Image: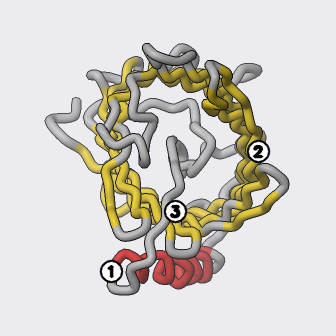
Amino acid sequence: MVSGQSSSGRESNPIQSGPMAFPVMVALLVVGALQKAPSPSDEPFQIVDNSFLVEEAFNQEPHIVQNIFGLTRQGHDWVMTFTQEWPAPAIRHQLSYTLGINSAGQSTEFGDILLNYRMQVLEEGPGHPAFAPRVSAIVPSGDRSVGAGRTGLQVNLPFSKQDHDFYFHWNGGFTWVTRADRPDLLSPTFAGSAIYRLRPMVNLMLESVLLVQAQDAGSGRVDHQAAFTLSPGVRGGWNVAKDAQIIIGLAVPVVRQGGETDTAVFGYFSYELPFGKRP
């Protein structure tokens, strides 16, 4: 997942009420789920591939499409993303795309587009994690104030492993932005998370991301600035049909960068549903 930051000072924007609804929804979900019996510790998780900042190493099942909405709010700044994931045609290969909208000042602009391919190289099993590397083409939006504004490539190597009521995820990768007139920008990323199954359909989450952001320093030089994010959160949902699932979530990312600390609110909504004829 890719996220960004921007600013908006418009009090009339209807999106500003969105984050306030998520805490209420999540609270009701947790209260309802606590009344249900816990799952056996070795039973597979009912919620997977629904992390917020750290990518999980699982592709979509055949004939199941996933729609993912993310909303990050910090003060008057907000960023909304939409990702749609498709099996191609089975679990081995997955195609997806990511769109973004950033609100900054008095304007709202589209961010860069990501075209993603992910291969399920290794499914999780006894003694080894799941592994599903991803490569994404960055298509510039045309507005460099809200995106890289250049063609680029993003690579991520996610691993996932369940240990009883915990799921652990590890990521390592980079974003490479090409620039014909200046040096290319290469930004490494490292991430990890621990997810605890509180109830079958409620998970507590702790995600962390270290981004070493490449920045133009002028005179043909490139500087790197580290940003560390620690994000506690909760996710939960419902299996509304045999092959359909709704997941909502809430997190509070805390970002430490350049000696300053900023806090945001992140809301998540995912809906998986079947398409075509299943065998």
Q: Residue furthest front?
A: 219
Q: Quadrant of residue 206?
A: bottom right
Q: Tell me if residue 270 can be seen.
A: no
* Residue corresponding to mark 3: 72
Residue depicted at x 67% and y 24%? 222
Give the vertical position of 158 relative to 182 (above or below).
below
* Front-lying residue, 4 or 171: 4
Residue type at mark 2 is: His
Question: Would you call the spot at circle 3 few (<14 residues within 10 Å), some (14-19), or many (20 or more)?
Answer: many
Q: Could you tell me residue 273's position as x and y percent? A: 28, 49
Residue type at mark 3 is: Thr
- Which of the labelled discs sits on residue 164, or is there none? 2
Residue depicted at x 58% and y 69%? 74
Residue depicted at x 77% and y 50%? 257
Regarding mark 2 in the picture, which secondary structure is present there? Answer: loop
Q: Could you tell me residue 197's position as x and y percent? A: 69, 57
The CA span between labels 2 and 1 is 42 Å
Q: Tell me if residue 152 can be seen.
A: yes
Front disc: 2 or 1:
1
* Front-lying residue, 228 or 47: 228
Labelled pair 2, 1 in contact (Cβ < 8 Å): no
Left or right: 1 in relation to 205: left
> Which callout, 2 or 1, points at the residue further toward the start of the chain?
1
Residue type at mark 1 is: Pro
Quadrant housing the C terminus:
top left
